[in-house]
Amino acid sequence: MISEKMKELVKNGSAIRAMFEEGKIMAAKYGKENIYDFSLGNPSIVPPVSVKEAIIDIVNNEPEMELHGYTNNAGYEDVRQAVADYTNKAFGTNLSAGNIIMTVGAAGGLNVALKAIINPGDEVIVIAPYFGEYDNYISNFDGVKVMVDADLERFAINFEDFERKITVKTKCVIINTPNNPTGAVYTEDDIKKMAEILERKQAEFGTSIYLFSDEPYREIAFNGLEIPYVTKYYRNTIVGYSYSKSLSLPGERIGYLVVPSELDDFDEVIGAMVVANRILGFVNAPTLMQKVIKKVIGNTSDLSVYEENKNILYKALTEMGYECVEPKGTFYMFPKCPIADDKEFCEKAKEFRLIVVPGSNFACPGYFRIAYCVDKAVVENSLESFKELIDFYKR
Ligand code: PLP
C-alpha cells in the first residue's frame, strides 16, 4: 500500500500525464504534423556544438575511473570555481567555489535548498501564477505553501498581498524570473521593493527569510533585456540555476546553487545543503556534465528562435482578440481564456488540434499556457487553429 501523501501526488501527477497521452492519441488520429502541441517546456533547439565537442573530448581524454567516480557531494572544486568566476564576471558578485553547489538541475537545487532550511510547518511563499512543481517540493519537507495572489496587470508581484502573507513562520520565498508560465520578468524596481519588504519583515519578526531565485530561464530574455542579479539587492538570496533550457540539456540534469557568504548562518546552511545533496539520493551532480559545463560555460543554444516564435504568436493572437501580457522572456505565453473555465477552454482547443495547458495548473484559473518551444513552422501553422478557436467563442 502506498503512502497517503503519495496517493494525493499520484492523483495530481496523472492529470499532466493524461494530457501527454492525449497528445499521442491525437497525433495518431490526425498525423503528428497536424497537431499543435504547446504543452511541454522541452527545448526545441539543439545544444551548441561546443557541448558535443566537450563530451567527446572529455570521454576520449579524461582518466575513466576518475571521470565516472563519485565526486565531493558539492561537485568538482574546479567546476565550482569556474561557475563562481563566470558569475563574478557576468554579475559583479564576489563568489568562490565555496559558494557553489553543483546540482541535479533546478529541481534538484530547489529540493536541496528546501531540505536544508525547512522545518515541518514553516511557510514557503510562492507568487501566482507559478511552476506547479513547487507544491510538491514544498510538501516533500512538510513545509506549508502560502500563495501570493497574481498581479494580473503585469504578472509581476502583488506587493500588497505579498506583504500581508509574510508571517513569523515565513522561512522562504520562491521567485522565478523570467517566469514560467507567464514569460514576465521582474524589473530592478520590483526586486528592490521586494527586498525592502523582506528586510522590514525580518527585522519585525527577528527571523531569517531566505529568498530563492529560481532562474532556469535567465538567458532567455527578449530585446536584450537585462535580468537583475538578485543577490545584489537582498542578502539572504539563494540562486538556483540550471542548464536545462539555456543549453537545451534537460535530460542531462545539471545546474547549480549560488549561496553567498553574506547569507544568515552561511556555514550551517551551505553545510546542510551539501549533506542534503547526498541524502536526497543525488549523491552528486552527474560528473561528465559537470566537466562539460566547465568547458562550455557562457555558451548557449541559439535562443533567438524563441523570441521569433514569441513575436509571431503574440502579434497574431492579440490581433485575433486574445488578451495577453506580452512575454519578456522564456518560451511561454499566458493569455486569458475567452471563457472563465480554463479547463473547458483547453478541452475545446483540442477540437482545433491545439494542446495548451489550463492556467489552474499554475494557480491562475481563467488563463492558459502556450509553450512555444517548438519549430517556427508549428507556430505558423497553428495560427489558423487559434483563430478558429477564438471565433468559436465570438459567435
Ligand atoms: N523551475 C522552473 C520555473 C521550471 O520551469 C523548471 C522546468 O521546466 C524547473 C524549475 C526544473 O528545471 P530542471 O529541469 O533544471 O530541473
Image (cartoon, rainbow, N blue to C red):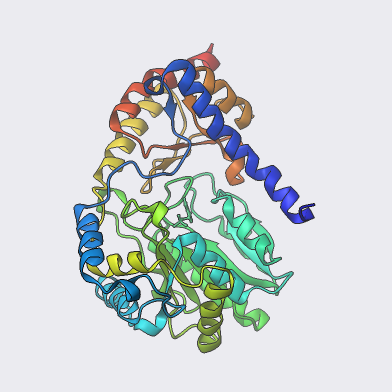
Tell which of 164 and 284 is nearer to you. 284
Left or right: 35 as drawn, with respect to 212: left
Left or right: 113 as drawn, with respect to 44: right
* Residue at screen point 29% across, 43% down: 45
Tell which of 76 and 34 is nearer to you. 76
Provide residue 65's location: percent of width, then percent of height.
34, 74
Q: Residue furthest top?
A: 395
* Residue at screen point 67% across, 80% down: 205
Tell which of 73 and 70 is nearer to you. 70
* Residue at screen point 40% across, 74% down: 69
Provide residue 131's location: percent of width, then percent of height.
54, 51
Instruction: Residue 98: name its quadrant.
Output: bottom left
In the rendered image, the vertical position of residue 219 relative to residue 122, given as above or below? above
Tell which of 276 and 179 is nearer to you. 276
* Residue at screen point 36% across, 47% down: 328
Provide residue 172's location: percent of width, then percent of height.
59, 70
Asked whether residue 353 appears in the rendered view, the answer is: no
Provide residue 87's location: percent of width, then percent of height.
30, 73
Q: Quadrant of the C terminus?
A: top right
Asked whether residue 308 appears in the rendered view, the answer is: yes
Q: Residue furthest front?
A: 65
Left or right: 213 as drawn, with respect to 141: left
In the rendered image, the vertical position of residue 254 relative to residue 393, given as above or below? below
Instruction: Residue 70: name its quadrant.
Output: bottom left
